[in-house]
Image (cartoon, grey):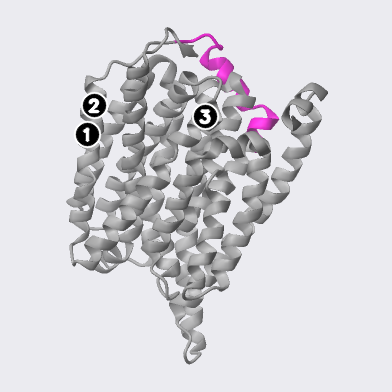
Amino acid sequence: MTVSKIISAKDSSRIFTICCLALLVTSMTFAIRAGILSQLGVEFALNDGQLGWVNAMAFLGFPVAMMMGGALYNSLGAKKLLLIAFVCHLVGLLLTMSAEGFWGLLISTFFIGFANGAVEAGCNPLIAETYPENKTTMLNKFHVWFPGGIVVGALISKAMTDAGFGWQLQIAVMLIPTILYGVMTLKQRFPEIERIKGSTRDNVKALFSPLFIFMAICMTLTTTVELGTQQWIERILGASGASPMLIMALITGLMAVGRYFAGPVIHRLNPVGVLLFSAIVATGGIYTMSIATGSMVYIAAIIFAIGVMYFWPTMVGFVAENIPESGALGMSMIGAAGMFALSVWNPVIGNWIDSAREKANASVVVGIDPDLVAGQSVLANLAVFPVILVIAFTLLYIYMNKKKSPTEINAELS
């Protein structure tokens, strides 16, 4: 696909702003949900395993929307997908505020997850096709607003929790940017998109290439490392002596800055080099968090942030650049793979916490907080994922270098 005619700079700027606002809402849902997990657990008498299933619905709705949106992008276009996202965000937030128990939270969270996936399905290919010569860099700049929104959501959640406001009001805050991007989408004229890179059948065929399958498997790990850790940060680090929501704000603030200035890093290392570097640093970050307490947790969080900041947009950009025949469907499916994996791992992480806390309570070691032991145990388990990625991205780096011509290699070195 390609933009059928030149888009004015003004229209491009407005469309990019709409995409960023929609992603802001998406990220705020992650942050505020993470911040209110304890409140939900207390109010509805839910254990961490049940809270894991609530979290899982967000990460299940996401890939369902991305798979559907990716397949229908050619016929629907980005504007209709964004309007679908707006309606689902609105419905999901209102249903969450009126939820009366476990099942209400499950259904409402699925709607929010579906909305989040529709945002990604519509915006990623639109931005990639609007900036065909600079896809990975611009996708990183667009995805600044994922960590950026988490910073906003984390700080809002902490401030409102500290002030004694209930979780319903924290959810209500997200209605403001939701209505804003919905109204802007309705008013904005989007460019028409022509299909010139093959049919949906061609896109589907590209999904079965060995390279795409390999990247999809890697995406399940990168997403779990990045978002699995952050979504449970309040439960994992609540007893560490550091403020979990401030840690989340610190991590995502650094991620936002890193993604905004991603261009020089990607040019210097190339996307595969960035992914390998990220996996190495993320391993160190999660391991350090698993043994740190007090102020050292903040240092560990900085290392972790540097490790995960480029994962998501660089994975999407790699597919856009190296498997272009997969089209919008490929970009959607790579994200869907990550979020689906996270929907599977969320209940597992919740059960890890419950199990580790029970073992810690049973041991009755004086002076040892069971919640601290549980959090550190879960982080140690999660540290295995980036270790696997170090091996995978090393193999990918070797493979991609073998594919390059001498001219390409010299161009990179110059």
**Amino acid, disc 3:** Met
* Depth check, front residue: 365 or 7: 7
CA separation, marks 2 and 3?
25 Å
Percent x, y for residue 36?
Answer: 29, 60
**Circle 1/circle 2 CB separation < 8 Å:** yes
Q: Residue, x 48% and y 92% (percent of image)?
A: 366
Badge 3 marks a residue whose secondary structure is helix
* Depth check, front residue: 54 or 222: 222
Percent x, y for residue 228?
Answer: 48, 54
Percent x, y for residue 55?
Answer: 38, 53
Badge 1 marks a residue whose secondary structure is helix
How many neighbours does mark 3 have within 10 angstroms: few (below 14), some (14-19), or many (20 or more)? many
- What residue is shown with label 3? 331
Of the numbered discs 2 and 3, the one sitting upstream in the chain is: 2
How many neighbours does mark 1 have within 10 angstroms: few (below 14), some (14-19), or many (20 or more)? some
Q: Is residue 253 above or below residue 319?
A: below
CA separation, marks 1 and 3?
26 Å
Numbered mark located on residue 184 in the image: 2
Badge 2 marks a residue whose secondary structure is helix
Magenta part of the chain: 194-214
Rendered image quadrant of residue 182: top left
Q: Is residue 65 left or right of residue 183?
A: right
**Residue 374, can we see it?**
yes
Q: Nearer the viewer, mark 2 or mark 3?
A: 2
**Amino acid, disc 1:** Leu
- What residue is shown with label 1? 180
**Amino acid, disc 2:** Met
Percent x, y for residue 155?
Answer: 31, 57
Rendered image quadrant of residue 16: top left
Indicate yes or no whether the magenta region holds residue 204.
yes
Q: Is residue 286 left or right of residue 184?
A: right
